[in-house]
Image: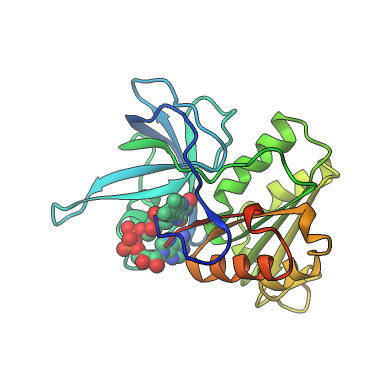
């Protein structure tokens, strides 16, 4: 994980006390959800599924063709209430080993994973409004958090805004899932934001920073959670604080 920067906001705070396990998992499902991104489901072969908090990640190890063993971290995409195993949402990175290795796994293949890890979790008490800001597979921990808040806990008090940035409509990860949730939960607001949309796009345009800026009135009542690549995370973090969100209410996880 990258180092926390010296600017405002909190990177993964102290990890919650969930037992960390190293176990073997078999691939139950590996599906492309858009041209670069797969959702992969892992089922433990000999152990019980570990307990975790929405927002935590696992570390996956594999051996490269040159014999070198590497490990990479992946946010858990499925909610903790799913007890059969866990899902990841993985983007193929050009020239990268692990991301392509995972996306190429077939049903029945086996891998080892260690988890859960990390402290990028919902901090209680919740503020009146929560903003989840992500690009690409940075949406993974937010899918788990949204499910926990809205479905499992039945929270109707906290307004939750998912601001998701990508270039084109076909890059939007799990769009129909979040659209369905928005129809079902009146306190959930879904703002996919496209930087290269065609004329037919009626939603938000530009970058996630622009969408967030439109909704930052009463900043002291808001919590901002950010996940994705460093450049976006740092910009959104600084923007939120400059608009008046309390630094203690800004949390982030960086993927690089
Ligand atoms: C806590 C944590 C959670 C993470 N969760 C996820 C996740 O849920 N899904 C996911 O796809 N990745 C996630 N990552 C990134 C992941 O760990 C790997 O870095 C990524 O899959 C690239 O690994 P690689 O071996 O293929 O390529 P490498 O050779 O290790 O990486 C090449 C470069 O790819 C860039 N990169 C890393 N991640 C991404 C990305 N998602 N999109 C575009 N470029 C990237 C980095 O700049 C890196 O330097 C997470 C990282 C951390 C630290």
**Quadrant location of ligand 1?**
bottom left
103 sits to left or right of 11: left
Q: Position of residue 9 (x, y in %)?
A: 58, 59
Which quadrant of the rendered structure holds the N terminus? bottom left
Q: Looking at the image, can residue 251 be seen?
A: yes
Question: What residue is drawn where x is 60% and y is 28%?
Answer: 81
Question: What residue is drawn where x is 80% and y is 64%?
Answer: 215
Q: Position of residue 205 (x, y in %)?
A: 73, 74
Q: How many marks?
A: 0
Q: Residue furthest right?
A: 186
Colour approach in the figure: rainbow
Depth check, front residue: 157 or 107: 157
Depth check, front residue: 48 or 251: 251
16 sits to left or right of 79: left
Q: Position of residue 65 (x, y in %)?
A: 17, 55
31 sits to left or right of 184: left
2 sits to left or right of 234: left
Q: Looking at the image, can residue 110 be seen?
A: no
Depth check, front residue: 130 or 68: 130
Which quadrant of the rendered structure holds the C terminus? bottom left
Q: Position of residue 224 (x, y in %)?
A: 67, 56
The image quarter in which residue 214 lies: bottom right
Q: Relative to residue 2, is residue 204 depicted above or below?
A: below
The image quarter in which residue 152 lies: top right
Depth check, front residue: 98 or 248: 248
């Amino acid at each position: 994980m990258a180092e926390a920067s010296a600017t405002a906001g909190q990177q993964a705070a102290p990890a919650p006390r969930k037992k960390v396990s190293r176990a073997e998992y078999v691939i139950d499902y590996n599906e492309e959800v858009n041209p670069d991104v797969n959702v992969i489901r892992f089922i433990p072969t000999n152990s019980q599924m570990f307990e975790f908090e929405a927002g935590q990640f696992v570390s996956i190890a594999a051996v490269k063709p040159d014999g070198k063993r590497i490990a990479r971290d992946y946010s858990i995409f499925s909610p903790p209430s799913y007890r059969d195993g866990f899902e990841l949402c993985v983007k193929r990175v050009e020239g990268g080993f692990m991301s392509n290795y995972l996306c190429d796994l077939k049903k029945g293949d086996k891998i080892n994973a260690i988890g859960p890890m990390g402290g990028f979790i919902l901090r209680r008490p919740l503020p009146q409004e929560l903003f989840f800001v992500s690009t690409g597979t940075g949406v993974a921990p937010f899918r788990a958090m949204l499910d926990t808040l809205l479905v499992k806990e039945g929270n109707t008090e906290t307004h939750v805004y998912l601001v998701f940035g990508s270039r084109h409509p076909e890059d939007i990860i799990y769009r129909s899932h979040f659209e369905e949730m928005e129809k079902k939960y009146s306190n959930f607001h879904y703002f996919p934001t496209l930087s290269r949309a065609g004329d037919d796009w009626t939603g938000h345009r530009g970058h996630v920073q622009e969408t967030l800026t439109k909704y930052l009135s009463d900043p002291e009542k808001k919590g901002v959670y950010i996940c994705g690549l460093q450049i976006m995370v740092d910009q959104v973090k600084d923007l939120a604080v400059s608009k008046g969100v309390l630094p203690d209410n800004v949390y982030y996880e960086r993927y690089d």
